[in-house]
Amino acid sequence: MSETGTDQLLLVEDSDDHAELAEFYITDYSDRIRIDRLRDGAEAMSYLEKVEASPEQHLPWLVLLDLKLPKYDGHEILNRIKSGRRLAGVPVVVFSTSNAAKDIRQALENYANSYIVKPMEAGRYGEVLCEILQYWELNQHRAVLDLDTEQRRDA
Amino acid sequence: GLFKASESVSREEWKAFADNLNIEKYYPGIQGIGFSLMVPPEKKEEHEQAVRAQGFPDYRIKPEGKRDMYSAIIYLEPFDWRNQRAFGYDMFSQETRREAMKRAGDSGVAAMSGRVTLVQETYQDIQYGFLLYLPLYQKNKVLKTVQQRRDALVGYVYSPFRIKDLMQGILLTAQKDVSFEIYDGARPLSETILYNHADSKELLCNDSAHKPHYDGLYRVTIAGRVWSLYIYSKPGFTSLEEENQPLYVAFGGILFDVMLFFILFINSRKRTFAEALAQERTVELEEKSRELARSNEELEQFVYTVSHDLKSPLVTSMGFISIIRKLADRGQYEQAVEKLDKVVRANERMNQLIRDLLELSRVGRMDMDKKSIDLNELLKAFIENQSIRLRNSDFSIEITSELPVLYVNESRILQVFENLLSNALKYAHNKEGGKLTIYAVAEHEQWHIFCQDNGSGIPEEYHRKIFGLFYRLDADSEGTGIGLAVAKKIMKFHGGDIRVEPRKKGEGAVFRLTFPQQTSDKRQEKGRNV
């Protein structure tokens, strides 16, 4: 957690319900995480391209990426991030309902930092998100990447 | 199949194989080419029934009796009057034949039997004969030891020969100077005479009284069997110089002809049969694996799609239930109750999905009886039923041509039109009021029913995707995305199809339902006019 500002979490999720779940638990966990939601592959793609293209754009602290997205799917977005010179260092946690081997394999081959399956048991959704956030807070990438830590009025 | 092995050859295939050899033309004396299947006692009953079921009600393994092992001639081409006597015959039950069969089976190579009187012999023109056996084993088995071969033995490709026909057929050299006798075995005994080329009945080999000028006794081994070949000069052949054809050539000629024939025959049988079998199997196998791969893929895709679409609302439901608990714990009761809506909706969605899936699977099975349906009347009634819904959405349906009478399942076809209407209501928006136009066109052997709306059409890239299970162009809309998948299944069931027509400028989406013409055959029966 940055001392002064907030961390930007990019939530790429097409389901409003799942996004609401995530937002509830993330803000519950910490009010220093700012969630930016992208609703489909096209939005995500253009956002990322903007960030990659201009050095003034700060990088997100963490990306939570769903795979089933309209227009471009999660795998393509993942690929875009991990092949960008600036973006590649940003941790991407694939967060999907799919536990299919072919999805897991493809994500790892595209250098996803981890692949977590959305839990279907009561209570676990919140717990798993907490664990993810706790873990990535330990990561030292913030020390060397140009993260977006600007304070913003609303999350 | 009749074969225990992984290959199975049908009667038709055997006939084709044998026909291809053109037996009578190329192989004189040969009675045909057949297949004898080894049948263990515990399989005898099953085997006989299987063959009877192929159209031979009187078939049984002959001779009757309990034995440790049976064999049965199940294929024999040409299946003429002589060969039919051999059908079902157990060659293994006869000593001479059994000896050769065992030898062939244990060694893995062709074996010739001793002298026999063929089963095909009747009372006309009796000759001696012999049989040549080629063992056939299960595929992909190691056949290095005798025991391995015995374990893997399936049966034999074999040919019966009538010796006189054979000899007279294969002898390529003119035989005015020499004649010969063939004995079965290493010693030329009159009891074991196989063939006497001379017209006279006397055998000269052991006859010291009438010794020919030149003679020779040769032993030849063909396919594990020893023949004694006694070749001699005919009376009237006096001197070497007088003849054009040297005697040794004549002798050698006969020997050569006999040997050559068998070598070629055995080799060609082995190769051709194996090749023919291999080729057929390969093609069939390739097709089957392609089919299998295709349906496996479809199944995988189906499972993948379904599991995601069911998991997602489950995540939502459970996720919000925990949030409700948390909020309640914190005393935020109002907010907690608000979240209940999400849970209910997610569960409803799962329910709908399950119902749709059952619907989809049912399309293949039950209540699929068809009858002659006049589409004009069907759709008129349909439009009436939907009138309130249409009015509320400022939508209309118009039929602009005569529609055919088709032999279909009424409720299923209605379902297709309902799905199309639902889609049109959802996606085809037009300021002047939505409209669905339906018309029919006959072409070749088919009827095409077109459903065109006046919306903005469907982009090219989605034309095939929309028929996919749970695929929705607009994820926020109502519905589970199963409508078109069901429609497609229904159309396929009727032998037809549903497709999106290529886009034309200014047109909305056009769906084409194709019915094969035969579905309207029944209409001819009913005496209606086209």
Image (cartoon, coloured by chain):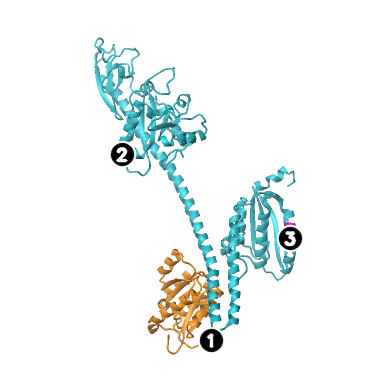
Q: Decide if residue B41 is on the left or right side of residue B54.
A: left
Q: Is residue A55 above or below residue B142?
A: below
Picture disc at residue B383: 3
**Chain identifier for the cyan-coloured part of the image:** B
Dividing the picture into quadrants, the one containing residue B202 is top left
Q: Is residue A25 above or below residue B244?
A: below
Q: Decide if residue B71 is on the left or right side of residue B352.
A: left
User: Which of B133/A78 is in front?
Assistant: B133
Magenta range is B379-384
Q: Is residue B456 magenta?
A: no
Q: Which residue is mark 2?
A: B147
**Mark 2 or 1, closer to the camera:** 2
**Mark 2 or 3, closer to the camera:** 2
The residue lying at 72 percent from left, 59 percent from top is B382
Q: CA distance from mark 2 to mark 1?
A: 84 Å
Mark 2 burial class by Cα count in 10 Å: few <14, some 14-19, many 20+: few
Which amino acid type is marked by label 3?
Ile
Q: Chain of mark 1?
A: A
Q: Which residue is mark 1?
A: A154
